Each structure stands twice: as C-alpha cells, then as structure tokens.
Amino acid sequence: MNGPVESKPLARLSWFTLGWNLLVILWGAVVRATGSGAGCGAHWPTCNGSVVPLAPSVGTLIEYSHRLTSGVALILVALVLYQVRRHREPGHLARFWSAASMILILTEAAVGAGLVLFERVAGDTSVARGYWISGHLINTFLLLAALVLTARFVDGPPRPFASRVSPLRATFPAAGGGGATILAVLAMVLTGMSGAIAALGDTLFKAETLREAIAQDFSSASHIFLRLRILHPVIAVIGGGVVLMVAYRTIMANPNRPGTRRLGLVLAALVVTQWFLGVLNLVLLAPTWLQIVHLLVADLIWMSLVLAAADASS
C-alpha cells in the first residue's frame, strides 16, 4: 500500500473520470435527440457489422462516437478501481464506491446494448421503450452517485468503516433521521424518469407551436408519451421544492462548515436555474441544445444532493 503522495493524482483521476462520464451521458442525449440511436443498425458491439464503419452517415458518426467515448469511460472507471485498491486500505469507502462504479458502468453498457439490439432507438414509439429509458435513467443516476462518492472519499478526509457497519450506513450515517433527504432522492428519481419520458415525446412527436404542444398533452388521441409529458413539470416543481428544503437544512445546520454551506447554496441555485430552464424548454419547444443543458443541470443537482447527504452526515 503506497502513501499519501498518490492522493492528488488519484483525486484528479477520480474527478476527471466523473467529468468524462458526465460528458458521455450528455452525448447519449444528443444521440437520442437527433434520432441517431440506429446509426449502427441493430448491431452491438460492432457498427453495421464492422468494427470501424465505412462511409458512415452523420447518424452513424454520432452513435459510433458515443460508443467510443463510452469505451473510454469504462477504461477510466476500471483504472480508478485499480488505483484505489492499490492506494487505499481495506475498509476505505473509496474502495466500495469505486467497485460500485465498475458494476454500474457495466450495467450501463448492458442497457445501452439492449436498447440497440432490441431496436428501442430512433423512431421506435413502443411503450417498452419508455420502460427501457426509465431503467437507463435510474442506472445513470446510480452510476453518477457512485462516481461522485468515489471522488469525494478519495479527495476528502478518510471515513473508514468497520466490518459490522454497512458502507451505505457509513456513507450516510444520518440517513435514518434524514427523511427529507430520502424524499428528495426519490423525488429526483421520479423527476428524472418523467423528464426522460417528456424528452422522448418531444423528440418523437415534434410540435410546431406551443399551442400545438399543449393540445398534444391533453388529447386522448395522443401517444402515451405525450399524455404523460404534462406530469413532468408538476413532479419537477414538487421535487425541486423538497430539494430546496434539503439545501436550506444543509446551509442552516452547518454554520461552522463553509464548504458544506456552499454546497447547500449551490444546490439551491441549481434548482432555481432548472425551473427557469424548464419554462424556457416549454416556450422554445425543447430544442436539442436546451435539452442537453436541462439534462446537465439535472445531473448536477443529483450529484450535489448526493454530496450534501454524505457531507452533512459526516
């Protein structure tokens, strides 16, 4: 086991891996928003039957580049796991969360492969696709949580745990009394799932005007994705309110911990920003660039909430 001299490089690697995975997730949203999910056909891991596609279309380039960057993400997560096991002693929480990250990025790849192989991409409007993307969203949130906790425990003061204490309890020791935090986590998951369905509806059934989009939401003849879309802003407002409550408690309960208070302020600012982006998304009829920004802020809220829950408990 090597000493603290490796802490800074390992911390930089952990945070870089988190950032890279976040970019991969956003690029995956570009794949969905541009209808490029079928760019490699129903082939995985090859692209249209080839390792390197010949004379690729734009859609193929978008999908293939997503696969390449996802492969790099997998290598980075594996490297973090290897380095953490080398430089952190048994019982260190970074070991648990780096192993969890490895498992979750493998399941992320499996879900991505399933979307392609079962053709739940591009113009597919089946209800099954809604279940697939909801599962994909949950796995993505869990992956981001594992990655951000790996970086946090690699970079911050150690918080070892005894064998009789579960890693989850050691990470969030106040979880039993943190009903608002648990509710905020559940609210974020529901908001993310409803947002994924709403974004899919925006992509598959483009409206030309705001009036047409609202009419789609309330028409009994509309696709289920459109009729569910109206739920997203309601869930987002309620869920955001719960997250704001957690942010307020984080600020007020840590008067002598400026770093934790700052995290609470960032969390609150992100929620308000996301509400503004949601309104803008509605008015502008969900352009691709705004969908990506909206997803980015959602992921930042989720990671900040996870960090606040871990930090406020320490």
Image: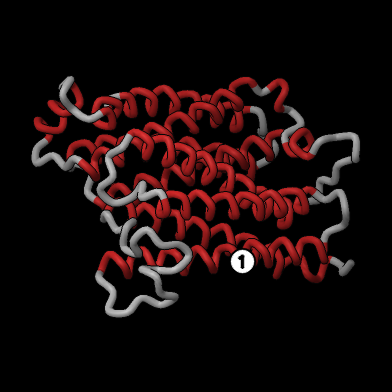
Q: In the figure, is residue 244 to the left or right of 92?
A: left
According to the picture, the residue beneath numbered tag 1 turns out to be 76
Residue 314 image point, x, y percent: 75, 37
- Amino acid type at circle 1 is Leu
Q: What residue do we see at 9% from left, 30% from top?
A: 211
Residue 80 lies in quadrant: bottom right
Q: Nearer the viewer, residue 127 or 220?
A: 127
Is residue 202 in view from this perspective? yes
What colour scheme was applied to this rendering of the protein?
secondary structure
Residue 10 image point, x, y percent: 71, 66
Q: In the figure, is residue 266 to the left or right of 229?
A: right
Q: What residue do we see at 33% from left, 61% from top?
A: 41
Location of residue 177 with respect to 300 vertically, above or below? above
Location of residue 67 with respect to 52 vertically, above or below? above
Residue 124 image point, x, y percent: 28, 45
Q: Nearer the viewer, residue 70 or 307?
A: 70
Locate the N terminus by quadrant.
Answer: bottom right
Q: What residue do we see at 54% from left, 31% from top?
A: 247
